Image (spheres, grey):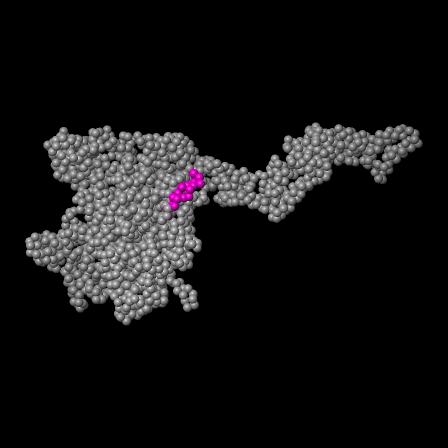
Amino acid sequence: MSTTHVRPPASSTRPAVAIQATSTPVLSYALAHNRVPVVSRLAFTNHGGAVQGATVRLGVRDAEGPIGEPVELLVDLDAGQTTVLSDVGLVMDPAAMLQIEEQRPGSIEVDLLVDGEDVGGTAVPVQVLAANQWLAAPVPLALEMLAAHVLPNHPSVTTLIGEAADLLEQRTGSGSVQGYQSGPERVDEIVAALAEAVQRRAVRYTEPPAGWADVGQKVRTPGDVLDGRVGTCLDTVVTLAAALEQAGIRPLLWVAEGHSFLGYWREERSAESVATTDVAPLVNLVDLGLIRLVETTLLTSRGTAGADLHAPAYSAWLAGAGDLDRVLGVTDVHRARRDGIVPLPARTRGRDGAVQVVEYRPAVHSVAARPVERTPGARAGQPGPEVPARVQQWKNSLLDLSLRNRLINYTERAGLPLTVPAAQLARLEELLHGGTAVQLLPSDRIAAVHRERGLATARDLPEAQLAEVLTERRAVHAEVSEGGYLPRLRNLAYKAKTVREETGANNLYLALGSLVWELDGRPLRSPLVLVPVTLAPTSRNGVYRLALDDTGSSTPNLCLLEKLRQVHGLVVPGLTEPGEDGAGTGVDRALQAVRQALADAGLPHRVEATADLAVLQFAKYRLWKDLDEHWADLTANPLVHHLVHRPTEAFPDPVPDTAGATDLDELAAACPAPADASQLRAVAEAAAGRTFVLEGPPGTGKSQTITNLLARAVADGKRVLFVAEKRAALDVVARRLEAVGMGPFVLDLHDKGAKPAEVRAQVQAALEHAVAADGAGAPTEGAAAADEDLRSARRTLARYAERLHEENSAGLSYYTARTATLARRDGVPTLPVSPAFVAAASAETLTAVRCALALLPDIADLVRPSPRHAWAFVDTAQVDLLAAQQAAAAVDRAVRDLPSEPHLARVLREVRTPADLDALAHLLGGPTTTLDVLDEVPTERWNVATTTVLGEVAAFSGAVHPGMELATPAALELPLADLYVAAQTAQAGRFMARRAGLRAVRERLQPVLRPGVKVSLGDVPELTARLWRLQTAAQGIVARASVIPGLAVPPGWNPLAEPELLVGQVEWLDRAGRATDSASDFAVALRRWVVQGEGPDPAVAATVARLRNTVTALLRVCRSNPRRLAEWAGDDGLVLRWQMTRPERGVEHTGLMSLRRWADLVDTLEPLRAAGLHEARALLVTGELPAEDAVRAFERGLARASVAERRDATGLDDFDADAHERAITRFTAASRAVRAQLRSALPTAVLAARPHDAAGDDGEVGALRRELAKARRGPGVRALLARHGRLVITVTPCVLVSPDSVARFFPAEAGLFDLVVFDEASQIRVADAVGALGRATAAVVVGDSRQMPPTSFAEPTYGVAEDDAVELLGTSVEDEESILSECVQARVPRQWLSWHYRSQDESLIAFSNATYYDNRLSSFPAPTHGRPSADVDGRGISLVRVNGTFHRTGAGRLLRTNPMEAKAVVAEVRRRFDASPDRLPSIGVVTFNAQQRAYIEGLLRDAGDERLVEALDRTDGEGLFVKNLENVQGDERDVVLFSTGFSVDDRGVLPLNFGPLNRVGGERRLNVAVTRARRQVVVLSSFDPAQLRAEQTSSVGVKHLRAYLDLAALGTDALPRDARPVAVPDRHREEIAAALRDRGLSVRTDVGLSDFRVDLSVARAGTPEEPVVAVLLDGPAWARRRTVGDRDGLPVEVLSGMLGWPAVERVWLPTWLRDREAVLDRLVAAVGAVAGAAVGSVPVAAPVLAPPVEGPAFSTEEAAVPPVPAPAEPPASEVRVIVPLRAAPPAVVETVLSPEPAEVAGSAPAEEVESPARPARRATRKTAAPLLDGETAFSPWTPRGGLERKALDSLDDPRAARTVRRVLTAGLKAEGPVHRDRLVRAAAGAFGLSRVSEARRDALLQLLPDGVLDGEFAWPETLDRAGWTGFRRQAASADRPLEHVAPAEVGNAMAALCRAAGELAEDELFVRTAEVFGYRRRTPSLALLLQAALTRALDIGRLVRQESGALTAP
């Protein structure tokens, strides 16, 4: 073990944790091969703040590296608490361990990491052994692992056995090596032969190491020893042990200091545990001859042939008293195999040198002697069907005809011999059968006159004298002395009772007559006639009486008869089973029949007349016979058929699975008892006819589920068989069926219910019930209304849960969306998500988005996305990387070529897009212009002017002008005005001049004329005129264009020749004007350049244009656009941004990795684009939202959007909390009403469905009636069922049986029942269950596979005397397979009951829930915090240390006991009885062994307290029990005292021998033991938990015991934790908690130890450990519950009812969101109301615990039919209190308030009240009935204490007498009339005295005035006894038992009840009177008291009995 604190923290926030690791100190290959964990316990003590999700890493290594797979766990560490991990699963690698050749050091390393940071660790040093090495350290574990070195699978062993077989053949004539089949003598012969075979190998002896614990030894294999012929003592021991094991003989390896020798069991037994270090019990077995020893060194070179092998070992190591200290321990190899320790693989080398590995395969040897097969066909001479192997196996387990069976081999000490003369055996039988009880007397209790004559015992008396004792005194003498009489008889009675409780069969027999015979030379004695009897004491210390168990009759020993038939072929004529008349087998006739048969057969055996009383396992014979004769019929059942033929395959149920579609809420309304969802699912499965296993852990309501299941099955017309071995289990179900109205249909055939007369009465009553119920009407209108009201309320509540938690497409409900928004208030931004998205997004879309966001951080880490990333302008992943690289390189070159002229550079700085570059290139490549022009261009004026001019030019150039058909446009360039003048002048001139002038003009025009045009002179004037006019028009256009700013119109511009001249200028100016007409930075820079720049430059323009072109090409390649480019360029501008990002871009690198990664980023986020989450995508691609926050931001966005979407979609904005609460109230009330109606409706339906006329006298019904009417010689049960079985089952379709009674009474008919239900199936053997299974169609196997398996109730356990039990200490009883485990193995479908109701403090079940049930149980937190207490009113689990010593050696009653611890237990029991004077406490005592149990019970019975004896003798499931681990299953009590018994030895070491707990499955026994308590477990232990070194054993049971003791010592902090963190906190819950804390209240959240939690536990700030309000929310856990009842009914009922929470409040989410302040006000008011109610509550005189609840709790209104009819006496009260812890006030759960509280509170003087009223809570009560005449409320008187006790001892002192008289008078005034014992006990209590003797009582009563006492009651002097008509109603019977109520008062109550009702039947009057005095049911003792009071009231005329029998008051 190592404890290592963490290294000093680097900061104050770093956790500080201490780590304690408990591990195995020595590691070996054997440990690795058997997968034994090397770390048994890890404890983390957190000295800092709470840590969630810490990582624990464990590894094991040696000097060369790891030798096992590392383990990594997650664990939560609470602040200031210790967290314990008890199963971390660290094991070694066998392959690695096999390679280790020499011992070396190693270490187990434990590291603790928080958020990836190593905050602490420890390294535990260990020793790593070589593969074949064995070291005796630690001794217990080493001894266990030594069994792994025994290799029966080694080939050399097989050869050795062959040699031994040859020797056996030579010596005995038989070479058979068959284990134990032929008795112990044959075992000795086999061992001797094997030993001689070893000796013949001539093995050379070599010395072992000096000390096993220091150096150890490398153990040689059998091949090394036998073939290599060398070995140490240990080598030869394990080799011969391997041979014994292979031969079927169970070896024992004895290890002493420096030596080892062999032992073996001569009978088929085994030790209690694999390793026994306390060897004294085994030495005792050696002395008894059950174990023999073999000194194997004598088989080597050290020995001689024929030497005695036993004596040397015994004399050297076991003979002397001090020798045992030198024995380290003993290893039982057989027990090791049973416990899972298997041999190491045997490795040998073949002739070729190859290694051959032989794995272990267990050999099958000894089985019970098989009876001869007897099939019907075989008896008829025809071959019968072959018996399947499984059936034969079951038969063999039922009928053991070996010599182990005491019915065959009855030893001298097997029972208790009785001294009965031979002639009186028949008389003894006759007396018993006649109903006469016979007393058992001690053998030395004889008359004094006989002693005077020298006679010592009854055996010395004459036969006549003995006959007289029997005949006259009805007594016989038992052969036990007076001193041993009580212990012996008590033990025998207890064993008989235990067997009957466990198996349902009475195995206590009076064995009359014996057959003395021999078998194979071995003398035997066998009983002949078995008379079933009961054994009971006449008084506490009186004699015991024998009485006939009338469920059976005298029976021949059929096991013996079968054995004789098999061995000798002997058949005894006439000696068969009892006849049908139940008369049994006459002993005289039987003895004579056997004598005659022996004589006829010539057998030399004799019959003796003996009488013995013994527990004998005879009931199994009937089961064997049933299976033997009817197995073929039984296999018609599908499950039986499957178990016979295919037990390892999955069971295919032939019935289809339709139960899954059942509406469980609807089914709940059809069940007569409340049921949770898991119970309802089981009922649905059964109703569907399915076969299944129902796993019901402790307290989960198995009985209540079975009740509903049976009731529904009967109501559905099914015939049901209910099977349980324990009577208590059937009683619980029977009471429940009676309570729900189904009692008349139940037939009880289980043990005591199987008496013929009682069975006939049950059937008769069922028939009569049918007659009485005929004509029952249909359901009433009220029932129909309740049914409809239930459905309506259920629909409302179900609809709310559905709407609140209905998920949208994003998987979020209204609730989870709200909590998600609260959970993400951590600074993480929200990704924008729309409500439309969460409403419509598919699961695939959400998955894709989430996956993308999850991948994003890794990708973004490489990309580092931002708006300025080198490729941020690229928005697609579809990019040609090579083309992009080339385009980017071109851009780089173009940028480099840009001129550096400052003005131009400033413009380039503002470029963002290719358009900007184009504009710049435009200006650079155009004409010089001015800013004025550019500013004018965008104006409308300029636009109009240019548009007009361009229009004119276009019109002018496009028009057809006269003259232009002759001339070209160049004509307009001529001086046409001059030519026009000349032409006109010439035209006006004379001819010649005209011609000359016109010719000259024509010549001037000639060049501009179109080719081929001839112009006559006459046309010249007109042509010139036209051309001139056209020129004039053109000049006008030119003139108008010339005035427009910016247009450069040449003076000679000819619009016709150059019509496009202005278009280009206008377009250029327009582009230039637009470029500069902006407020953008680029336009401003461009304007500045126009003003300040160097002007246009075509070369520069070309450079800029090249840049423009390369950028455009890049955008095209990257599938981007100018807008994204401009966004990317930002304020830096395109050129500068490009230059700045050039290194990041890395264009010069191959592959362009930067763009590749960017494309990956864009591709990753593509699902967001596809989902329409564009805004969210933009935030991520630009890096505005960090990638590592993407997932949380998205989830938060989903949550916020879902809140809005769900609010609108569900309509919960309109939720009405008040209406919802009313619906819950309606649901609860309607559920009760419907269930109440079912109690009559179900029986009515069953009766209506009967196929026969129950009232008829004809046919089969008439015949049955006549049979039942026979007063004498009526048919036996079997005969009745044989004749009328079908009709009887129809009348009583629910039959309660044990496995034995099934075989006894029912024919083996397939399908006789529709359903069989097994309860406590984990303890029913498969063979026992087959008979019941085969008679039914379907089966429900109910049990708990984590509880005890069946145990062989063999004679060593239950059939031997006390002395024998002591002698056989150290042996164990084998566990067997149960029908439950068999069904689980066959994979029969399983259902699971999940709600745990038993524990009033959930820590009682938390250990088992975590350790055995995988935390699948839902338990309920109690209203208390803090540590548990061992006080009388404590709760939880606590540890009390006792300084006791366990007596491991010696003799007598103290052997194997711890007297001091036993006395401490008894003292604690008595303390609790003294604290509860008015009622018997509910207490159980559990011990580890039978001896401690017997000792404690003996102390209790001898304590002189009748109440203790009364409590011990109760059989109704309450009171006091004392049991050991083996038989406590099925019991429960309020308080359980757990006595561990063991202590450290003389060396201060605690031996790890804990009996059955050590074995495989031992942890199941522990689970049973620790789950028996309802309120409190107190562990009394004589050792500290730390002294239990569980790491030194492989036993799981011992490890779990250590964990449980840690829990008892440390509290729930030490609970085993799941190695994983708890769920994410509910932020909604935390928000409410914070708000309540702000209101000044103390709040704890998530309270509980299971998956059911109280969401908020609210207490006042001053008392945080005393919560007063439980707040439940409507969260996901609430919604997951499958029924409305589980959600809205069950938790509140259990919390407020059974667990006593003063107030339980609900907070509905919509209400909180709408008005949180109102909700807070309500919760604060609830806390205040509880506090206020506590001030004025009624004081509680004594704590009364709630009755046990095994299912969903009933509310107060259902008290008339409680879910678990309380078996306690007095019955369950109307006041139920949860006992508080320390200062915590008791919380009254249910109180029936008096109509006059003032009178109640003031009925006792204030100064005489023990203490002020403690805080309590009044629950809502039923409407109080009107007061009856004379009725007042009873208030118990509790005087104030503190008075000196010496006053009671000084009554002769007047002052003392006066003080005592005052107290007595006050009590008389407060409670009179009062019973004298009650008055005296209460008065004595004021003086500190809890018990009062009769003498003191009489002395105190003498102080009362004369005449006050009237019989046993004291009356106030002022009360007129004759005329008093009053009575006092009490809330609970515990306030005042009825025997303490004056008969006159009871009669007054009866009179008042009759007066109020008019008249009452006697039974009804008794019921109502009992209710007045707090009783809910009648018991026989109660009925006697009521009858006496009625008789008195009739005698004095208070009541009158009418002729009808009704009672009236005059």
The residue that appears at 16% across and 41% down in the rendered structure is: 1984
- Verify whether residue 163 appears in magenta: no
Q: Which of 914 and 1069 is in front in this view?
A: 914
Q: In which quarter of the image is the C terminus?
A: top left
Q: Residue at x 82, y 33 (%)?
A: 972
Q: Is residue 1300 above or below residue 186?
A: above
Q: Is 221 left, or right, of 377 in this rendering? A: right
Where on the picture, by quarter, is residue 1116?
top right
Give x and y (percent) for residue 622.
24, 57
Q: Where does the image place residue 345, in percent across and percent down from the top left?
A: 38, 61
Decide if residue 455 is in sight here. Answer: yes
Q: How many labels does the image show?
A: 0
Residue 1248 visible in the snapshot: no
- Residue 1906 against residue 1528 in the figure, above or below: above
* Extreme residue in the bottom direction: 170
Q: Position of residue 223 (x, y in %)?
A: 36, 65
Q: Is residue 17 magenta?
A: yes
Q: Is residue 190 left or right of residue 1089?
A: left
Determine the residue positioned at 25% across, 38% down.
Answer: 1744
x then y, percent, for residue 172: 26, 70
**In the displayed structure image, the side of residue 306 where residue 983 appears, left or right:** right
Q: Nearer the viewer, residue 1513 or 720?
A: 1513
User: What stretch of residues is rendered in magenta?
Assistant: 4-22
Task: Using the image as rendered, state which of residue 1689 and residue 1027 is in the foreground.
Answer: 1689
Quarter occupied by residue 950: top right
